[in-house]
Each structure stands twice: as structure tokens, then as C-alpha cells.
Amino acid sequence: MDGSEALACYRRQSGAIRAVVLDMMMPGMEGLAVLRALQKQDSQLCVIVSSGMQTPEKTAEALAAGAKTFLQKPYTDEQLLETLGRVLGTTPQDTRVQVQGWVGG
């Protein structure tokens, strides 16, 4: 999924989405631009940025733009659930029950 597709998907389903895991290296639109657009649409949205090649400067820029945290790739399912739980204020077990409708891939 490229950045513009991700934004369109969020617009279509924004009422049902509480958190987004955003790859910082996306085709068509860089991750920071997508993050800024998401935050413009919903400043309360929990965005977790992720990358396998992130620099400390880019991480700081993403956090300053509104990302809740950074998740280093590769990550396990448990690390993802723990991070989602932390930004959503739920336990990993509760988060596991709430995770549905994965979009992208």
C-alpha cells in the first residue's frame, strides 16, 4: 500500500481506527508526509512509526510530528501487541482481542 492509498483507507474507515502502524519508507509518499496528513485529519490518532532503516534524526522528527512511538523492524507479533497496548492504554491481551481488520501488508 502506498501513502496516498493509506490516507484514503483511513478517510474511509477513520471512525473504526484507533491506531496506525506506519512504515516510514512507503512508495509514492514518504512516511513523514503521511504522518503529518494523518495528524491533520485526527490529532488524537495513535500513530506508531516503524522502519528497519531509521536514523535517530528521522525518529525525532516523526515523534515531533505527532507519532506516539517508534517500533524497530523486524518486530515480533508480541512486540507489536505490546506497543499497541502501550499507546492505546490497554494490556497486550486486551489489544489482541481488539486487533481486527489488518489493512496493508
Image (spheres, helix red, strand yellow):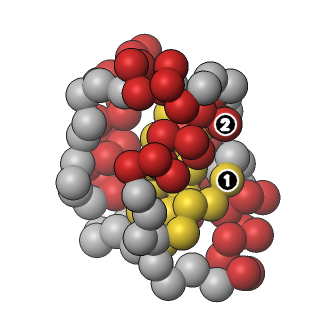
Instruction: Answer with left or right where residue 51 lies relative to residue 4.
Output: right
Q: Contact, CB < 8 Å: mark 1 with mark 2?
A: yes
| Residue 41 can be seen, yes or no | no
Residue found 34% across the figure and 57% down from its top: 3
Mark closest to the chain's N terminus, 1 or 2: 1
Residue at image coords 62%, 60%: 70
Expressed as whole percent of the image width and height from the top left, the position of residue 73 reads: 45, 70
Task: Answer above or below: position of 88 versus 36.
Answer: above
Q: Which mark is residue 86?
A: 2
Residue 25 in picture, x, y percent from top left: 40, 73
Mark 2: which amino acid?
Answer: Arg
Q: Amino acid at mark 1?
A: Thr
Of badges 1 and 2, nearer the viewer stands 2
Q: Is 57 placed left or right of 40 in the picture?
A: right
Q: Can you say whether 38 is above or below 14 in the image?
A: below
Q: Percent x, y for residue 82?
A: 57, 42
Q: In this rendering, does residue 81 appear at all? A: yes
Location of residue 49 with respect to 16 vertically, above or below = below
Front position in the image: 23 or 74 = 74
Q: Secondary structure at mark 1?
A: strand
The C terminus: image quadrant = bottom left
